[in-house]
Amino acid sequence: MSRAFNFCAGPATLPEAVLKQAQSEMLDWRGTGMSVMEMSHRSDEFVNIAETAEQDLRELAGISDDYAVLFMQGGASSQFATIPLNLLGDKTSADYVNTGIWSKKAIAEAKRYADVNVAASSEDTGFTTIPEQSVWNTRADAAYLHYTPNETIGGLEYDFIPDSGDVPLVADMSSTMLSRPVDVNKFGLIYAGAQKNIGPSGLVVVIIRKDLLGKARQQTPTMMNYQVIADNGSMYNTPATYSWYLAGLVFKWLKEQGGVQAMGEINARKARKLYDFIDGNDFYANPIDPRFRSWMNVPFTLADDALNSEFLKGADARGLLNLKGHRSVGGMRASIYNAMPEEGVDALIDYMAEFAKERG
Ligand SMILES: Cc1ncc(COP(=O)(O)O)c(C=O)c1O
């Protein structure tokens, strides 16, 4: 069976070259006679895999020595609690911007630990836009300002980095990490669940400015304490070794593609093509303010919801998989992360055009 174009929002498609390399190294990693999965995380071989992955990520994202890079577990969702537990310090309040379902989840969890101020929200628009920063009600005494640069479910993406002044800026970059160049120096902390642009699910990458380490509340579980994880090279316990290795292969692949600059150009082109097609065809619609349309997750509806299952069936038959929108919003969603080739987007557009012609 040949590989399909998989538009899943996550776990998402991985570069074929990466999967092939992992396959070829599965039984015997470079003459060691064993799989990476079977290696001690303390072995020279694995430590080298881990350090190389971190180094490649630092190069790709332009992460200076002022930041620690942590390879943690529990997905991005575990960070919703880990962040307040570590960053509140002697403060009690934190600012959050609510632009969709992932922001809301982060807010709900933070409320268990912090006095959360929702500095701005676009809920009244159905999360179709992002409030201008001039109307945000941020607080100078907040321990940090949290936002979600790309709302994976809604398909809503910031086209600016908020200015948080002296307050550390915290970003859930799960679905936009490494999709285009970003100035890491503007952030106190960046976190990203791996299963979109990095690797297998479960792994979460945390990039934290070193001066923010060491402030964890006394009751913070050891495994959630950034200082402990940093001091132990993300190996306080047994890390997710195979996921870390695969992430490393993805980083190498990204470097071969020309890094995040080249990726950003390709991603912009892929997204533009798809939105242009949707806008130019009466049969399809995307509800998001054009300025804030996501490059990574493109939700769209058909003129008649009754045709949804037929659309999905036809897509499946062509090897265009996982186009069903999130259960909370319905419709369709095409996730077009780094590993989705431009031909995948072209094939989707061809199918959409044909379907609209037949059924529109
Ligand atoms: C923006 C965003 N944040 C957080 C999460 C949760 O990630 P995880 O399932 O790794 O906990 C997701 C998952 O899709 C996401 O898209």
Image (cartoon, helix red, strand yellow):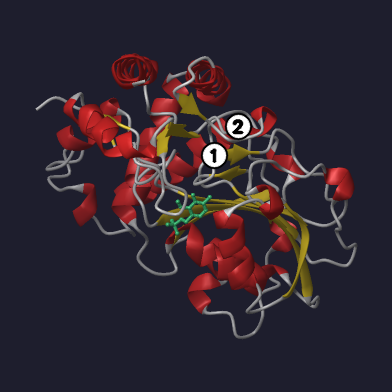
Dividing the picture into quadrants, the one containing residue 358 is top left
In the image, what residue occupies the spot 52% across and 14% down?
A: 280
Q: Is residue 335 visible?
A: yes
Label 1 CB, ligand 1: below 8 Å? no
Q: Secondary structure at mark 2?
A: loop
Q: Which is nearer the eye, 291 or 32?
A: 291
Q: Quadrant of the N terminus?
A: top left
Amino acid tagged 2: Arg
- Residue sitting at the far left: 1
Q: Are marks 1 and 2 in contact (CB under 8 Å)?
A: yes
- Residue sitting at the far bottom: 219
| CA neighbours of label 1 inside 10 A, class few (<14), some (14 to 19), many (20+) | many
In the image, what residue occupies the spot 37% across and 26% down?
A: 340
Left or right side of 242 for 283: right
Dividing the picture into quadrants, the one containing residue 101 is bottom right
Instruction: Measuring from the top left, give residue 300's x and y in whole percent.
Output: 46, 33
Q: Is residue 359 above or below residue 245?
A: above
Instruction: Measuring from the top left, give residue 63's x and y in whole percent.
Output: 63, 40
Q: Point out the tag, 1 or 2, that comes first from the N-terminus.
A: 1
Dividing the picture into quadrants, the one containing residue 92 is bottom right
In the image, what residue occupies the spot 64% across and 74% down?
A: 85
The disc label shown at residue 97, or none: none
Instruction: Measuring from the top left, give residue 218's x and y in whole percent.
Output: 64, 84
Q: Quadrant of the C terminus?
A: top left
Q: Residues under labels 1 and 2: Cα distance?
A: 6 Å
Residue tagged 1: 155
Left or right side of 231 for 291: right
Residue tagged 2: 293
Amino acid tagged 1: Gly
Q: Secondary structure at mark 1?
A: loop
